[in-house]
Amino acid sequence: MTGLIDIGEVVRRTGVPVSTLHVWERRGLIAPVGRIGLRRQYGQDVIRRIAVVVLCRRNGFTLAEIARVLEPGAFDDGKQVLSRKLEELLERRRRLDQAIDGIRHALDCPEPSPLECPVFERELDGVLPVGKDDRRDLDLNPRRGGSLGG
């Protein structure tokens, strides 16, 4: 089997630890094409696949989502995984932009405390769901909080 890349070379060229490669292999993201002794051997395309996995992970994709994107024919079904991820990332960006604006305001605000700031007070009005159909389903996940990061 010529043109194969030994797992040690894959680690050297990608910086991805062997343990991570093994997890990705079990999840179907990469696959060895052979072995020399106990050492896995990969095709030349594994470096590009690993780069795709790293890029997707960096952008918040789960391993299951990445597996769907990498499977044969993934783009034949309307690209639903990518469409959903795009919506998720756009919402995350909107919330991050709100948080950035809120922090900038807090840094420039002349009030002695955020609790005395009318802008912050208006921001607080939309934070708690109490009173909305008598639901009290607070989302305290900091990744989805208000514009001041909460």
Image (spheres, rainbow, N blue to C red):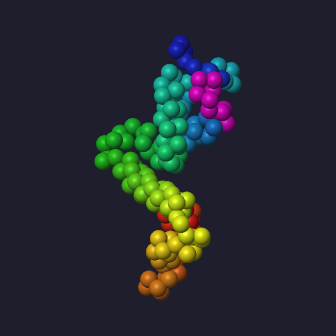
**Residue 37 shows up from this direction:** yes
Q: Percent x, y for residue 63? A: 53, 46
Quadrant holding the N terminus: top right
State left or right for residue 69 relative to residue 19: left
State whether residue 31 is above or below residue 111.
above
Magenta stretch holds residue 77: no
**Residue 148 shows up from this direction:** no
Residue furthest out toward the right: 38
Q: Percent x, y for residue 79? A: 34, 46
Quadrant holding the C terminus: bottom right
State whether residue 30 is above or below residue 117.
above
Range of residues picked out in magenta: 10-19
Q: Which of 38 and 69 is in front in this view?
A: 69
Quadrant of the image occupied by residue 115: bottom right
Q: Percent x, y for residue 3? A: 52, 14
Residue at the image point whose x is 55% and y is 75% from the top: 116
Residue at the image point whose x is 62% and y is 21% from the top: 9
Q: Is the magenta stretch mostly helix, strand or loop?
A: helix
Q: Percent x, y for residue 78? A: 30, 48
Q: In the rendered picture of this protein, how many numbered marks are placed on residues?
A: 0
Residue furthest out toward the top: 2
Residue at the image point whose x is 44% and y is 39% from the top: 70
